Image (spheres, rainbow, N blue to C red):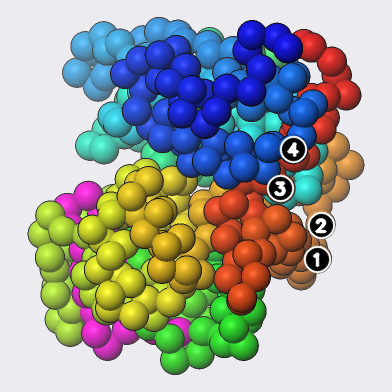
Amino acid sequence: MAVTDHVDLNGFMEGVKKRNPHQPEFVQAVQEVAEDIFEFMEDKEEYHSQQILRRIAEPDRVVSFRVCWEDDAGNIRVQRGWRVQNNNAIGPYKGGIRFHPSVTESVLKFLAFEQTFKNALTGLPMGGGKGGSNFNPKGKSVREIMRFCQSFMTELYRHIGADIDVPAGDIGVGGREIGFMFGQYKRITNNFTGVLTGKGLEWGGSLIRTEATGYGAVYFLANMLATKDEDLVGKTAVISGSGNVATHAAEKIVQLGGKVLTLSDSGGFIHDPDGITQEKINWVKEHKTHRRGRIEEYVEAFPSATFHAGKTPWGVPCDVALPCATQNELLGEDAKTLVANGCRAVSEGANMPTDLDGVHTFKHAKILYAPGKASNAGGVAVSGLEMSQNSERRSWKEDELQQMLKDIMSGIHDSCIRYGDQGGGYIDYVKGANIAGFKKVADAMLAFGVV
Ligand code: GLU
């Protein structure tokens, strides 16, 4: 037997920690997957001997680069940019770009790792990647953002391509930034190709891409509730975040008859006991995206609400919860509070919003709990459909795409049941998602031999 064979979970995680010092988010993401995969692999010698998990948890490459740009006052600013290409066993690397001061190599490695499983779950041929920068778009002028995006792409362009690596948006990167980056890519390469997704409809974008992550998270939630013969009608929902994912999740909850009580941003959360209606959601979209305002201003527009500075919304009693802001925004204590208050289902719109303690709490309580890699896959799924449309050089109709999104979310739900059904009416969606995502990538890697 080779010396590296059959290390146990703890031995494996010790190695991951040693090889990735000061990268807590990456270690956390690997741990969450490894807990389930070690159990699954117990009687599968080939995965062990071929070191499949060890290989998936080592990015194919991490490109790190300097991004210089000039601010409006003429100062030269220097940021760091990255692209993490985690795994392309089942398709070109695919995953968003994040611009936020909290971005580090650890954060992007965790996101690229998660993306690998998420993309596999969609059933579409996409590998896993992620990129970004510690650039803070907050308070920057549109011209500054444009210059930053152009400078970022001036390096990134050589590492990506429609059949190589296809970035998209994430926190701090929406349609406008994708436009600036696509413009620069086209200018440098003279190539009009589907190298980015989340594009504008006039230049190769797909209908419903904007709505897809939030809508998909609610479709997944509805699928989970249906296993208990329940739906969203009359249910109260607590949502964190107020960006693209949160507002579209809220919109779909309202469309399906639920009542949304909260939204948040980094300053705190608003609680509207009357419910955040479609009209109010439209106000939030306009306020956050176009006016780039703070969520606390909601209470001036809608006095039925209260603002809770510096707090997260998990203490508000609810039937369902959707963390749609960012990683580690829902901690073990919050999970306990949600469960104690009678929350029956959690569908993650963000990536890894629940810390490990929280994950264990939800699993232990056996509530309906969907990890982001399953429930927020709708966004990247429609990105995959955007890639197909670009390859075909045509655009599909909205109702076709809506149906495809619903089908993909149901397919992911089915995969979670296949590998996560624990009997007695309990489905461990974390385990189901981890195993289904892993198996697809792992089997492709086995076919390629040791590469
Ligand atoms: N950033 C999104 C995610 O976390 C979308 C990625 C994409 O569309 O490539 O899945």
Residue drawn where x is 52% and y is 31% of the image = 9
Q: Residues within 10 Å of mark 3 (few under 14, many from 20)?
A: many
Mark 3 vs 4, N-terminal side: 4
Q: Which mark is residue 396?
A: 2
Q: Which mark is residue 43?
A: 4
Whether disc 3's CB lies below 8 Å from ligand 1 is answered: no
Q: Residues within 10 Å of mark 2 (few under 14, many from 20)?
A: few
Q: CA distance from mark 1 to mark 4?
A: 42 Å
Q: Which mark is residue 400?
A: 1
Q: CA distance from mark 2 to mark 4?
A: 44 Å
Residue drawn where x is 81% and y is 33% of the image = 443
Mark 2 vs 4, N-terminal side: 4
Q: CB of mark 3 within 8 Å of CB of mark 1?
A: no
Judging by the rendered image, the residue that carries numbered circle 3 is: 436
Mark 2 vs 3, N-terminal side: 2
Q: Which is closer to the viewer, label 2 or label 1?
A: 1
Mark 1 vs 4, N-terminal side: 4
Circle 4: element type: loop
Residue drawn where x is 38% and y is 32% of the image = 25
Which quadrant of the structure image shows residue 20?
Answer: top left
Q: CB of mark 2 within 8 Å of CB of mark 1?
A: yes
Q: Nearer the viewer, residue 18 or 211?
A: 18
Q: CB of mark 2 within 8 Å of CB of mark 4?
A: no
